Image (tube, rainbow, N blue to C red):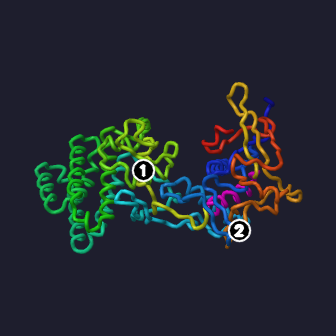
């Protein structure tokens, strides 16, 4: 291998969020350009990967998304990065100027949303609502690390809040229940200290409102972990609440809201039992990843494990084997499910999302994801000195003889800019109503042989070749020194 001299050349393959975040962090280092020469190679004409979006210039610049693009309120690092990008964009007056002057301005909180529930006789739209919490993600000091029990308690609080805020709790009855709940929580330590008082309180709660058992369980949960007797009492309260609630009049008067709370309680209580019985902590949760999350919930007593919430989890994380999204509990072993979400990591992810979000559970972008996320990253990185090579499709990564490093990168040049643009390169964005945006197809007027290129099916697919037939081979020590492989895992067998 030739001796490496001068700046270290870094080739970043792919322009998705992983690649862009890597480039952003490297170039955060003062004086980075004295050490590194960074080039990002991207197939097609835009950045973003799965997060790419474009504007249809033939249809009034309508935003064309690739899917559901939202961020969640526990994306602490993602918000911190995008806030920094907007701050630099505005502070240094990079062109084109942004419409949104800060990261928070580019998003809006969304704590209410519909979810589709197939379990109550055909698909039903259910309303899912979260509380607004303190703070903003990515602003101020990051939250301290929480253990599993902290996350469980926060999830309990959300469940109690949903129950107390349910439509059948309105009016005087609801007010009395909330006041009684506050008394239960205030005197929970007395109930916990004296067994005879605990028995009396539970007897009264059974007759006044079984819902208060849920509140009592929340109050007692703070001192339960690691104390077998208290853990058993907590499980008893949960079981008694479910038994009582399943016959609640709300089942007929408010069937949709009733079913949501019942399902949430059934699922959450199974998680709590699992955390207690398996002694799961932040240090050992990965030990349970050999079991599927659905299977794990079933093993810990979840009566309806395939429900509106677990479907949301599996859908949101694309956790299906070969695209199969059915759950067939009567089939044996591996045939039972087409699901594939590791139990430990899935549980941690769920509790992390529910237990640590700031301000809002969901954040909607006020423009396309390409416009809101990848425009600022592109503008800032380009002005920092990062190079971008669009229309470069990776065909093959050649390993060294000992297979310890990438020695060559074969890339097809899909399109070339016109001669008069060779120095400036391809300019990928334009402004729509003040928002620097990406088009849903290339700017043909910047490219050679545009007529031929337009006849190709899609320049963003690996299976579509260019028109020039030019394949460039980049060599380590000459064209690059290090590689950042930002291409999605699913594409790796083909390259």
In the structure shown, which secondary structural element does the residue marked by tag 2 occupy? Answer: loop
Q: Is residue 145 left or right of residue 13?
A: left
Q: Position of residue 266 (x, y in %)?
A: 30, 52
Snapshot quadrant of residue 334:
top left
The answer to whether the residues at label 1 and label 2 have Cβ atoms under 8 Å apart is no
- Note whether residue 133 is visible: yes
Tell me, for residue 110, which label it has, or none: none
Q: Point out the stretch of residues depicted in magenta.
A: 369-389
Identify the residue at horizontal 54%, vertical 53% (top origin): 77
Check if residue 149 falls in the magenta segment: no
Q: Position of residue 108 (x, y in %)?
A: 52, 67
* Inter-mark Cα distance, 1 to 2: 39 Å
494 shown above or below 46 = above
Identify the residue at horizontal 27%, vertical 72% (top origin): 170
How crowded is the residue under tag 2: few (<14 C-alpha within 10 Å), some, or many (20+)? some
The secondary structure that dominates the magenta segment is: helix
Tell me, for residue 57, which label it has, or none: 2
In the structure shown, which secondary structural element does the residue marked by tag 1 occupy? Answer: helix
Q: Is residue 464 left or right of residue 190?
A: right
- Note whether residue 29 is visible: no
Tell me, for residue 350, which label it has, or none: 1
Closer mark to the observer between disc 1 and disc 2: 2
Quarter of the image with the C terminus is top right
Q: Position of residue 354 (x, y in %)?
A: 41, 55
Give the mark nearest the N terminus, 1 or 2: 2
């Amino acid at each position: 291998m030739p001796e490496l001299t001068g700046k270290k050349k870094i080739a970043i393959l792919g322009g998705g969020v992983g690649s862009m975040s890597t480039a952003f962090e490297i170039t955060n280092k003062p004086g980075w350009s004295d050490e590194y020469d960074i080039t990002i190679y991207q197939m097609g004409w835009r950045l973003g990967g799965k997060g790419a979006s474009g504007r249809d210039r033939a249809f009034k610049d309508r935003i064309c998304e690739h899917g559901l693009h939202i961020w969640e309120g526990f994306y602490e690092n993602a918000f911190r990065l995008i806030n920094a990008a907007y701050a630099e964009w505005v502070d240094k007056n990079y062109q084109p100027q942004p419409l949104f002057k800060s990261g928070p301005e580019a998003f809006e909180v969304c704590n209410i949303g519909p979810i589709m529930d197939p379990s109550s006789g055909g698909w039903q739209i259910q309303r899912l609502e979260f509380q607004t919490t303190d703070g903003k993600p990515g602003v101020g000091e990051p939250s301290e690390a929480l253990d599993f029990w902290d996350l469980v308690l926060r999830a309990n609080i959300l469940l109690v809040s949903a129950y107390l805020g349910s439509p059948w709790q309105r009016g005087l009855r609801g007010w009395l229940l909330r006041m009684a709940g506050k008394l239960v929580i205030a005197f929970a330590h007395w109930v916990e200290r004296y067994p005879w008082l605990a028995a009396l309180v539970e007897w009264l709660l059974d007759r006044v409102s079984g819902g208060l058992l849920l509140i009592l369980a929340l109050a007692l949960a703070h001192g339960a972990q690691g104390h077998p007797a208290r853990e058993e009492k907590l499980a008893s309260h949960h079981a008694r609440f479910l038994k009582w609630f399943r016959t609640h009049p709300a089942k007929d008067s408010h069937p949709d809201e009733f079913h949501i709370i019942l399902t949430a309680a059934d699922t959450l209580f199974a998680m709590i039992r699992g955390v207690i019985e398996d002694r799961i902590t932040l240090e050992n949760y990965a030990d349970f990843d050999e079991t599927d999350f659905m299977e794990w919930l079933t093993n810990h007593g979840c009566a309806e494990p395939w429900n509106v919430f677990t479907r949301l989890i599996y859908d949101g994380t694309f956790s299906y084997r070969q695209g199969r999204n059915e759950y067939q509990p009567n089939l044996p072993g591996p045939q039972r499910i087409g699901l594939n979400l590791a139990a430990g990591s899935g549980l941690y992810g769920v509790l992390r999302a529910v237990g640590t979000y700031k301000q809002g559970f969901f954040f909607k972008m006020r423009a396309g994801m390409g416009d809101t996320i990848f425009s600022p990253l592109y503008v800032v990185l380009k002005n920092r000195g990062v190079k971008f090579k669009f229309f470069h499709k990776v065909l093959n990564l050649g390993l060294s003889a000992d297979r310890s490093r990438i020695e060559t990168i074969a890339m097809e040049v899909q399109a070339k800019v016109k001669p008069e643009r060779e120095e400036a390169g391809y300019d990928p964005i334009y402004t729509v109503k003040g928002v620097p945006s990406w088009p849903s197809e290339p700017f043909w007027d910047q490219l050679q042989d545009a007529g031929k290129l337009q006849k190709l099916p899609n320049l963003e697919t690996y299976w579509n070749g260019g028109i020039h037939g030019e394949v460039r081979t980049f060599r380590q020590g000459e064209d690059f020194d290090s590689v950042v492989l930002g291409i999605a895992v699913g594409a790796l067998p083909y390259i």
